[in-house]
Image: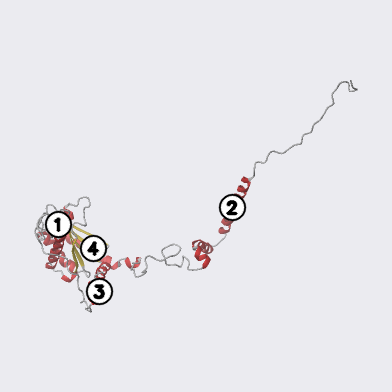
Amino acid sequence: MSDTGGKRPIIIIKRPVRAAAHHGGAWKIAFADFMTAMFAFFLVMWLLSTQTPKQLAGIAEQFKMPLKVAISGGQKSSTSTSVIPGGGSDPTSRVDGEVRQSEEESSNDPNDVKRLENLKQRLDDMIESSPVLKQFRPQLLIDITPEGLRIQIVDSSNRPMFDRSSAVVVSYMRTILRELGPVLNEQPSKLTLSGHTDATVYTQGDKSYSNWELSADRANASRRELLAGGMQDTKVLRVVGVSSSVHLNKDDPYAAVNRRISIVVLNRRAQADIENSNMATSALKQVGVKPGPGKQAALDATATKPGGRI
């Protein structure tokens, strides 16, 4: 035995203290970017709050300016007449020979609109005050369209405007047209007449005679009654038959109201459009013939023939 009396020596072991494992710091970078952006945002807001309204308008203009203009120079959006933001060709202007109407050109003359409104009121008053016309009021439709004042005389199952399958005007229809003649003659602008039928197929008679010819004949017969009532022939600019291509009652193409005569007292713009679209004038100029003043388009109508029920 040793002198220690049998006791073991005490051994002290010191272990080094190590830090916890590193788990990455990417979130710190993202958070720092976020805080920088927020600082920049509040700095911009503070700077804007110190600017005058005129300075703010100038700043807003810089954001409206296209990048190409900002880099290379050019016309600003505030001084551009184009309707396209940032510039570009104006679709309402006349480009490459194609005529496009601007807002000012397409708008109607206020005096012209007022004249047609007065005419509508006069016709309404005339119908209400006339014992003869008042009984036909449900068959007289008067409204204002982009072309002018439209007067529609519609058919009725119990009161047709023409003899069956013909252009012979019945007595009450003749009365209406002759009453309208003097009033329409007082208007400075011209008018158009359109004949309409329903969708019933013209099944009898010559195959070359259809709803197209019948509607044109009825429109031309209405023109003659207007002239008999005192309207001048020079007031008529166009007489057409449109068959059953335009229904008044779209849900029922065979309805009686689809058989009608439409008279449109044209506004100045619509009258000018029709007159300018008359290619006969250009054809006459090519052969050296000068067209006379007030020359009308030829009436697109043919002789009346009997046929099926319309």
Mark whose residue sits in front, 1 or 2: 2
Mark whose residue sits in front, 1 or 3: 3
Where's the C terminus, which quadrant? bottom left
Q: Is residue 178 something that shows in the picture?
A: no
| Earlier sequence position, callout 4 versus callout 3 | 4
Residue identified by numbered label 1:
136
Q: How many marks?
A: 4
Q: Residues within 10 Å of mark 3 (few under 14, many from 20)?
A: some
* 3D distance between C-alphas at marks 4 and 3: 29 Å
Residue identified by numbered label 4:
149
| 160 is higher (above) or lower (below) than 16 | below
Residue identified by numbered label 3:
282
| Earlier sequence position, callout 1 versus callout 3 | 1
Which numbered marker is on residue 37? Answer: 2
* 3D distance between C-alphas at marks 4 and 2: 64 Å
Circle 4/circle 3 CB separation < 8 Å: no
Amino acid found under the numbered disc labelled 1: Phe
Q: Residues within 10 Å of mark 2 (few under 14, many from 20)?
A: few
Where's the N terminus, which quadrant? top right
Q: Position of residue 209 (x, y in %)?
A: 13, 60
| 236 is higher (above) or lower (below) than 261 | below
* 3D distance between C-alphas at marks 3 and 2: 69 Å
| Earlier sequence position, callout 1 versus callout 2 | 2
